[in-house]
Image (cartoon, helix red, strand yellow):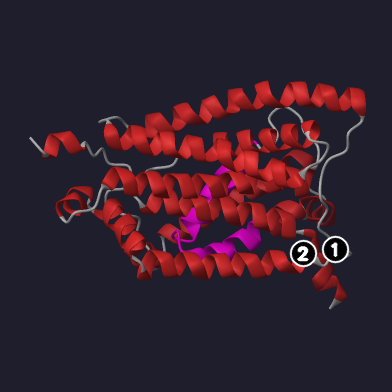
Amino acid sequence: MDGVLSLLAGMSSLFLAYYLAALGHAIVEKSGVLNLAIDGVFVLSVSTAFATAVYTHNNIGAALIVSMIIALIFGGLMAFLVTKFPISHGATGLSLMFLGYGLASLIGLPARNLQGRTGIEIGYTLDITNPMWIGVYVITILLGIAFLYIINKTKLGASIRAAGEDPAAAEALGANVLSVRLIAGIIGFALIGLGGAIFEISYTQVWSEGQGLGHGWLAFAISLSAGRHPLLILISAGVFAGLVNYMTAIQAAYSLPPDLAKMLPFVAAILAMVIFMATPLKRRLAPPKSLGKIYFREERTV
């Protein structure tokens, strides 16, 4: 029993980071906005959290809030661009992704230099000695239930689903698709930013250029393989968090080359998406019909 508790405590930080990022991604895509910016924003949030923690002498609250604010700006910008103008979701998302990578380096390098000169330590550790790890799992379950309720039982949720399925019909029924997607983008990217911040503050607690690279894509795969369903995302996030967190132990147990061990989470991500596409879940949890499709409101009001 102690071994199970220790395992759950050890992966709690990574589990929370992945879950928040995957849940945020699901919210964005439920509104019909294809989110290919996720990895760049995740990396930027990691860097922002590190820099804020260094400059504020490990003020964890400030690090989390600043990362969320930076991320939600990206979310609002992407939702605005792809809804207000007839431009590609994919091209917009990838452009913002690379912008996030570049800004992450600009923000992180000066902070790392300052940390090197001053020796400021950052981070908040969640492990078996810190009972707060239990709260992580409680919070994630409550978040999943809340998201499920909002999407299926509220006017906002109905508007988000309508914007994702048929934005023209949603407009005809009185919904403002731009406003709905802005709300979904801001909330979703704020959660992605919070996930990136927790990844840095509680999981890695150090920073180097490119920190967090690829983990946003893992959150993307977690969300996709769970059909963007918040409760299924819980399970998927737990599996991936365990795999990544205990990758070294897996490598040692099976005598795997280090480079092969590092590939495992990404191979698992591909397999998870393939399995999802090959099961009945693909039909039951199908993506929004207008996901990634160009919607230009002005064309429909002439």
Would you say the residues marked 2 and 1 are in contact, meaning their CB atoms lie under 8 Å apart?
yes
Whether residue 69 sits left or right of residue 172 in the image: it is right
Say what amino acid the circle numbered 2 marks.
Trp
Residue 207 place in picture, x, y as percent: 77, 33
Judging depth in this view, the residue of 32 and 177 nearest the camera is 177
Segment tinted magenta in the rendering = 213-240
- In whole angstroms, how far apart are the C-alphas of marks 2 and 1? 6 Å
Where residue 103 sits, quadrant-wise, is top right
Residue 159 place in picture, x, y as percent: 30, 57
Q: Quadrant of the N terminus?
A: bottom right
- The residue at the point 65 percent across, 52 percent down is 17
* Neighbours of disc 1 within 10 Å: few (<14), some (14-19), many (20+): few
Judging depth in this view, the residue of 105 and 248 nearest the camera is 105
Residue 257 to residue 131: above or below: above
Disc 2 marks which residue? 133
Whether residue 151 sits left or right of residue 201 in the image: it is left
